[in-house]
Amino acid sequence: MRKGASILIAEDERNMRQGLRELFEDDGYAVETASDGNKAAKKIQQRSYDLIVTDIKMPGMDGMKLLKKIKDSNSHTPVIMITGYGTIEGAVEAMKLGAYDYITKPFNLEEVKLIVQKALQFRRLNCEVAYLRRQAGMGFRLDQIVGKSDQLQRVLDLARKVAPTDTTVLITGESGTGKELIAKAIHSLSLRSEAPFVPVSCAGLKESLLESELFGHAKGAFTGAIADKRGLFEIASGGTFFFDEIAETSAPIQAKLLRVLQEREFMRLGDTKVITTDIRLITATNKDLKECIKKGTFREDLYYRLNVVPVVLPPLRKRKEDVPLLANHFLKKYNEKMRREIAGISPEAMTVLIGYDWPGNVRELENVIERAVVLETGDTVTLASLPERLLSGSIGSTSAISGVPYKEAKRETLDAFNREFVTHLLDMHRGNVSQAAEATGMDRPSLHRLMRKYGINAKDFG
C-alpha cells in the first residue's frame, strides 16, 4: 500500500463525497474532491492523480464520459467506478472501457480500502514497467553497436543466434568493452522484448542490500522494512534479468541464485511465501570465473548453470580498425549533446587514437572524445585536445629518444608513427587511397596530405 498517494473523488452526493474523503484521509492519502464530472475534468487538466474514484451517475459529465477523458489523457491512472446495485451492468461496461474496478453502494469500508490499495499497487507496477522499458532503451538494435572488425562481428552473429531462445548467456570481457550493450541487444531481439530488461550490478553493493534488491522483503523483515517490497526478480518476470559483475556476489547470494535458476522460485526476506518468476538470465563479468572457482570464491555448479552460451567481448586494442568508427560516432554524439560543430578529427590525432592501447576500452575512448569536444577551440579535434597519456602511449613501438628537447622528441616520434601507419594502411588496401581513407574515417585529402608530407606514393603498393 502506498501512503501519501493522491486521490480525486468525483461524486455529486455531498455526504457520500465527504464520507469517502474522510475514509481515505484516515488512511494517509492526499484527497481532493469534485461535485460533478466537469469539475473533475478541470482538475485532471491541472494536475495528475495516482487514483480517481468517480460515480457513474452525475449531472453534466457522467462517470463514463469522465472515464473516457481520463484514459485519453493518462492511461496509467487507475479509475474506480461507484455504482448502485441497479447500475452494476454499467460498471461492468466501464471496466471493459478501462476502469480498474467498481464499488457498490452501500459500501463495505474494508472492501473499499482493499480495492484502493490494489489499484494503487497496480499503478505503481505499471509505472515501474514503463520506467524499466525506458531505461532498457526499448528498440535497441545490434546495428547500433559501432564496429566492423571481424572480432566484433563474430560476437554480434552469436548474439543474433542466441537472442530468440531463453538460453542463459554469460558475457565476459574487460571493463568498458560494452557487455551491457550486448545484453540489451540480445533482449531487444528476443521474444521477451516487450517485457522489462532489468539490470543490476553487484559491484559496490553490500550483501544485505543486494539480497533485498534481488528478492524483496516482507514488512518487518529488518529494521526499516516498514512495508512489503517486491524484488527485482519479481519485477523482471516475463523479461530479461541482467546480472553484471556476477563474480562479486557472496556465497549465500550464489546459493540463492542457483535455486532461482533451477526452480524459478524464491522467497522474499522475512517471508515464507514462495514466489515464482519467469526470467531469462544474462550475466557478465570482467573476471576469469574458472580462476574464481579455484580460489573458492565462486560456485562451480553455478558457473555451469550460467555458462550455457559464453559470449567473449574482445578488448578495443584487439580491434583497432573500429577506433575511427567509434571516435567519429562519439564525436557526433557529443557535438549534439554540447551543441558544438566540430567537423572531424585531424589525421595526426586519429593516428594517435589508433596507436593507443585503450586499457579502459570503449568507455575510455568515449571519455577522451567527450573531453576533446569540451576543450577543442577549432573546428577539428587536434593533438592539443587529447590527454597527454595518449601521446606518450602511442610511442611504445618506437625507439626511445633521449638527449633531445621534449617537443622535438614528441614530433619525431609522431612522425615515425604516422609514416609507419600510412605505409601499413596503403599496403593493406593495395594502394587504394579511397578504401584506406574510409577504413580510418579520414577523407581523401587528409590522407593525401600525410602521404605528401612523408613522401609516400600509392603506386608503390599496387
Image (tube, grey):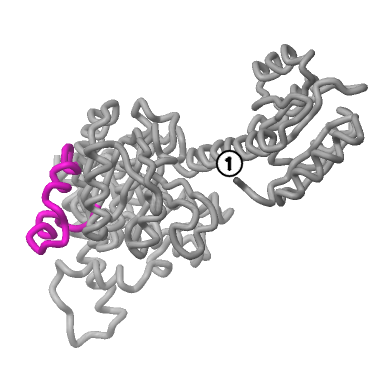
Q: Residue at x 33, y 36 (%)?
A: 279
| Image quarter in which the N terminus is found | top right
**Dot 1, how many residues are within 10 Å of its Cα: few (below 14), some (14-19), or many (20+)?**
some
The residue singled out by tag 1 in the image is 124
Query: Quick one: 153 or 451, which is closer to the camera?
Result: 153
- Percent from the top left, x then y, of residue 450? 29, 56
| Image quarter in which the C terminus is found | top left
Which amino acid, mark 1?
Arg
Q: Which residues are magenta?
A: 285-310
- Percent from the top left, x then y, of residue 288? 15, 56
Query: Quick one: 40 or 175, which is closer to the camera?
Result: 40
52 up-or-down from 222: above or below: above
- Percent from the top left, x then y, of residue 356? 25, 62
Mark 1 falls on what kind of element? helix
Q: Quadrant of residue 34?
A: top right
283 up-or-down from 96: above or below: below
Q: Is residue 5 left or right of residue 181?
A: right
Is 167 a magenta residue? no
Q: Residue at x 67, y 18 (%)?
A: 97
- Percent from the top left, x then y, of residue 428? 16, 44
Q: Residue at x 80, y 20 (%)?
A: 65
Q: Residue at x 16, y 51 (%)?
A: 424
Say whether residue 160 is visible: yes
Q: Quadrant of residue 92?
A: top right
2 up-or-down from 73: above or below: below
Q: Quadrant of residue 393?
A: bottom left
Q: Is residue 109 left or right of residue 270?
A: right
